[in-house]
Image (cartoon, rainbow, N blue to C red):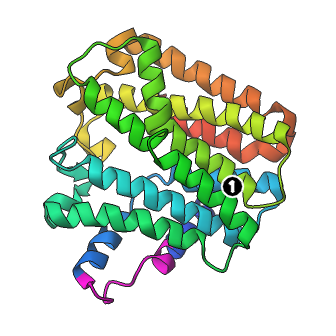
Amino acid sequence: MTFDQWTRQVLDRVESALDHYLPAADVQPAPLHDAMRYAVLGGGKRVRPLLCHAAGELTNAAPEALDAAACALEMIHVYSLVHDDMPCMDDDDMRRGKPTVHVKYDEPTALLVGDALQSQAFVTLTSHILDAQHQASLVRELALASGSIGMAGGQAIDLASVGHALTREQLETMHRLKTGALLRAAVRMGALAGETPSADTLASLDKYAAAVGLAFQVVDDILDVTADSATLGKTAGKDAKDGKPTYVSIIGLDASRVLAQQLRADAHAALEPFGARAQRLAELADLVVNRVS
């Protein structure tokens, strides 16, 4: 199976599973459920579900278990996007090539969509697909990644940094929390959904995830100044307009491109202990970085 074929297979599985795990649009309160499905279904790169499935191949995780973990990850990710786009945060009107939830519906609905998706993620992880031991480990990973020492904490730093100069080290810390924590969780949850991984396995996967997570943000910063809104599916140039610190603003465009390639190499190096078994993870690192090639 080629990488493109594998990617399509996983994306089809995840889309079908998301449709299953989300409340139906005709279940009351129907307007809220309709908005949740609008936010989640039919769009996005699904990088976190792909990473989850790829890591699960290392521990022989069951596809159905990976589907549940991948859906929970995507629900948390989308909840963060819905809230991030609201006027009290980044105030954006386009996401994934269509109107943001607060524009399509209204601000109270967008707030509730994010809240409900966060809850639904943990409902999904505690479904009958996973046994109690796997449920506990995956719930903990996702909760840590999405809370104050993870994604939410990174967003708090991001909001406080608008208009302020950050050092490169401070910027990296922010992004390792805001973006990197959930990407790391995707890799760890995929591995933990199968046979219990060794400490060495998790350590190597953490190194891989750290490189990929940071590369993802570096590439996003590059694309914000080099791509148009239609390509991005969101408003281009908004970080600069809003005075947000980025890798491009701190180290420059050329240096950011060099850094992205170095992080790609770091990700590949972290996978060396796994050999050919980590092929999909290696290909995903290439996919993340080559968005700017």
Left or right placement of residue 29 versus residue 214 in this view: left
Q: Is residue 114 visible?
A: yes
Callout 1: SS:
helix
Q: Observer-nearest residue: 271 or 71? A: 71
Q: Could you tell me which residue is drawn at 80 percent across and 51 percent down?
A: 58
Q: Image quarter for residue 43? A: bottom left
Q: Where is residue 84 shown, x and y percent of the image?
A: 28, 46
Q: Observer-nearest residue: 32 or 98? A: 32
User: How many dots with numbers?
Assistant: 1
Q: Could you tell me which residue is drawn at 82 percent across and 55 percent down?
A: 59
Which residue position holds label 1? 190
Q: Image quarter for residue 5? A: bottom right
Q: Is residue 264 above or below residue 118?
A: above
The answer to if 123 sits in the magenta stretch is: no
* Tag 1: amino acid: Gly
Q: Observer-nearest residue: 225 or 150? A: 150
Q: Where is residue 20 shown, x and y percent of the image?
A: 50, 80
The magenta segment: 18-30
Q: Could you tell me which residue is drawn at 22 percent across and 79 percent down?
A: 31
Left or right placement of residue 144 versus residue 242 in this view: right
Q: Observer-nearest residue: 135 or 244? A: 135
Q: Could you tell me which residue is drawn at 83 percent across and 40 percent down?
A: 199
Q: Is residue 2 visible?
A: no
Q: Is residue 91 above or below residue 10?
A: above
Left or right placement of residue 120 versus residue 9 in this view: left
Q: Is residue 251 above or below residue 280?
A: above
Q: Where is residue 272 shown, x and y percent of the image?
A: 82, 31
The answer to if 28 sits in the magenta stretch is: yes
- Dominant secondary structure (helix, strand or loop) of the stretch shown in magenta: loop
Q: Where is residue 101 shown, x and y percent of the image?
A: 22, 61
Left or right placement of residue 76 versus residue 246 in this view: right
